[in-house]
Image (cartoon, grey):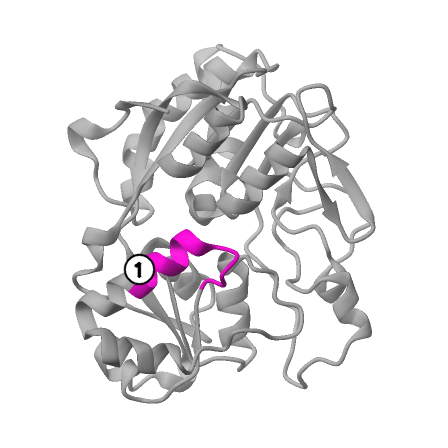
Amino acid sequence: MRALTIGLLLLTTVLSQTTAEAQSIAWPAFGPERNLLRFDGFTDTLPDFIGPIDGSAELTIFTEGNHYPVLLPLVLQRFPQWCREHQACEVDPARTLVVTLPQPMIVRMLRDGGIALGNAVLPVGPDKPVFPDLVMGGVAPLHQLREAGVVEARARVFAHSRGMAMLLSRRYDAVADLEQFSRQGARLIVASPSEPGARQQYHDTATALLGEPRTVDMFSHEVASFSGRLGIQHRDVPYALINGLADGGLIFSHLARFYAAAFPDRLRLVVVPGAERFGQDIAMARTVRARSPLAATFERFFLETARTAYPEGGFADLGDSFGRNIDL
């Protein structure tokens, strides 16, 4: 199964009425090819699980998903190559599992002991076949997982986002900036309430840059729901724009850049000056029951490569703050 080349609608969407414009989106693929039966498009109900979920993974990483365009090539391509070059380890990317869901979903899955995917249930826990060796996320979610006894007491910061940007449908090629978009009465797509941290960040940024009345008016045109919405902004936002369900979206700037490059005929990036000050750290923590002998080796590799890979992927350059320890 080629990772990430999957649709955005839940299985129940197949039985429901959808917009006439709705279409499956072929996502950029990561990871090794697998000669297996696959379900694409509207019927795929397993988004953002990359790798085996039967307990055979040799390394498992759970992470907030919005940095996946940078993370996945490092995990699935560069890490195996680095192992070969340094003769430090042997890694089969087909036996690596990466889960890239929004932070609240990662926290709940680890606290509750699993996740339901339609009628399928995936148990998750230190005594179950699937359990992460490493967790990546913001400081607050990692602190929640520390309180729940899931991760160790210390994490290391490896990235800092640069705040939000706008991702616009090509139907709105004349819009030059956030202020102009806010006066169009255009349909807005933004992180749903299931991602409260990102949603609040975008609202706070817009309020600081546009003022509260203009922000309230812009959000009054929000497309709050549509058939098959997942509550995963890095899928919902480009899906809504490509399918004509919204005209513009607020999303992390590195994702806006990634999707504008992936779908240049349909989407374009509009930079939002001043949004950088609302950026946030992403850190990595080891779980208290990490099982893979590869975990420590991957941490070494990752902290060698992330310093440059993340700025190249649209994140801030952390300078001397890269790799600093934070107590959870």
Most extreme residue toward the front is 147
135 relative to 115 in the view: left or right = left
| Magenta region, main secondary structure | helix
Residue lying at 29% horizontally and 86% vertically, measured from the top left: 174
Quadrant housing the N terminus: top right
User: Mark 1 is on which residue type?
Assistant: Met
The location of residue 18, given as percent across then percent down, is 70, 80
Residue lying at 63% horizontally and 41% vertically, measured from the top left: 50
211 relative to 248 in the view: left or right = left
Residue lying at 31% horizontally and 37% vertically, measured from the top left: 159
Rendering quarter of residue 129: top right
Q: Is residue 161 above or below residue 298?
A: below
Could you say whether the residue bearing mark 1 is in a helix, strand or loop? strand
The location of residue 10, given as percent across then percent down, is 72, 62
The location of residue 207, given as percent across then percent down, is 23, 69
Residue 244 visible in the snapshot:
yes
Residue lying at 43% horizontally and 67% vertically, measured from the top left: 190
* Range drawn in magenta: 191-203
Residue topped by disc 1: 164
The location of residue 171, given as percent across then percent down, is 42, 86
Q: Is residue 132 above or below residue 257?
A: above
43 relative to 296 in the view: left or right = right
57 relative to 279 in the view: left or right = right
Q: Residues within 10 Å of mark 1 (few under 14, many from 20)?
A: many
Quadrant housing the C terminus: top left
Residue 255 visible in the snapshot:
no
